[in-house]
Image (tube, grey):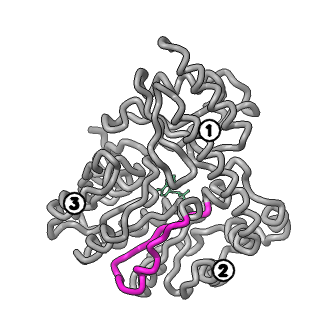
Amino acid sequence: MDKISKKIRKHLRIVQTYEGVDSNINLSKKSGIPTKHLIRLNANENPYGTINEVKNSLQDISLHEYPDPEQKILRKAISEYVHLPDNLIIAGAGGDEIIDLILRLFINEKDEVIDCIPTFGMYNFAAKLSNSSIISISRKNNWELDIEKIISKITDKTKVIFIASPNNPTGNLTKEEQIIELLETGIIVCLDETYFEFSNFSLSHLLNKYSNLIIIRSFSKWAGIAGLRVGYAISSEIIIKHLMDIKQPYNVNVAAEKAVIQTLKYKDKLFENVKKLMDEKVRLEEYVKTCNNVTSFPSHANFVLCKFSEFSSQKIYDFFAAEGIFTRKFDQKMLENCIRISAGTPEQTDKVISVISKIEKSNNI
Ligand SMILES: Cc1ncc(COP(=O)(O)O)c(C=O)c1O
């Protein structure tokens, strides 16, 4: 091993990096389709983007000044939105940073983190970076949590359990009684409600009773500002205090801060786009029901997990990509023949439906 590699912390010497979504330049190179014709349905982004009230507000921000390390105005705006006090809220550079901060706070070397697969890959990645062992527990066939199995895997090293609800990529919600069962163990339960505005289902009322509950939310998907990177956590006063103590002082930049404040001021306008996306999600699900070679799993979020009977995930991905449509494919055995398609505009759904209908007609793509 070379001298520099030897100096690197052992658990970080060989890291399987998190594969984020490809840039438009890469997608264009891979497909030969000009960037302006690409249809990105691979990251559950909001194709409507944000609204002018948010965009215009970014003109007059003081870019030379650091943001407020205490996030006072930002936390107050989020507090009014979630109807909970601002000392129970912390904002981060996306839900991703919140996940990372939680693990920085709780993990000692060799502690254990539980996730329930298939699920959002960031839990596994962040756990590995924190030098914990990730215990991945398979969901049941209908993607529900296998609570008995989870409980049986809890040891005195288990620190954090991550549950996304709606889950990415399966789209299903987790039942309240299951979350309560996990909370009763005393372990830190991170309930990731990144897709809350699409599902309209939250367990935030449990925060009153359980100080070990952390709810994660995001502005990336419903508010159409994924590029600005803002997410937040709601939890007990004690957990938020410690997260505030360890975060980088200027983790949410001034543009992101302003955009969130305006987003919340004009939230009803943004909810109109949320409604449009959910209508398109339903349209896609309804179309799939009429197909012979593809099924979908009921989804409470702005995406649909589709399973094709004949073709591999890669083949289906390639077939869509050749038409300029980018979806999310998976390597895991449990998601064999599956791709996840984000809800798009009506025109984008038309194109997706036309590609699926071509797949339906063809036995040999
Ligand atoms: C379940 C879930 N949690 C968190 C995130 C992170 O979102 P962001 O970091 O953009 O807020 C995502 C993004 O895909 C997600 O699917």
Q: Secondary structure at mark 3?
A: helix
The answer to which of 278 and 104 lies nearer the viewer is 278
Q: Percent position (x, y) of residue 218?
A: 56, 64
Residue at the spot of label 3: 150
Residue 201 is one of the magenta-drawn residues: yes
Residue at point 64%, 39% (across, down):
40
Identified by mark 3, the residue type is Ile
Region of the chain picked out in magenta, as a range: 200-219
Q: Secondary structure at mark 1?
A: loop
Dot 3 surroundings within 10 Å: few (below 14), some, or many (20 or more)?
some
Residue 332 location, quadrant: top left
Dot 1 surroundings within 10 Å: few (below 14), some, or many (20 or more)?
few
Identified by mark 1, the residue type is Ser
Q: Which mark is residue 126?
A: none
Q: CA distance from mark 2 to mark 1?
A: 32 Å
Which of the two discs, 2 and 1, labels the residue nearer the N terminus? 1
Identified by mark 2, the residue type is Ala
Q: Is residue 64 visible?
A: no
Image side of residue 328 versus residue 113, left or right: right
Which of the two discs, 1 and 3, labels the residue nearer the N terminus? 1
For marks 1 and 3, give the one nearer the viewer: 3
Residue at point 35%, 55% (across, down):
129
Position of the N terminus by quadrant: top left
Residue at the spot of label 1: 23
Residue at the spot of label 2: 77
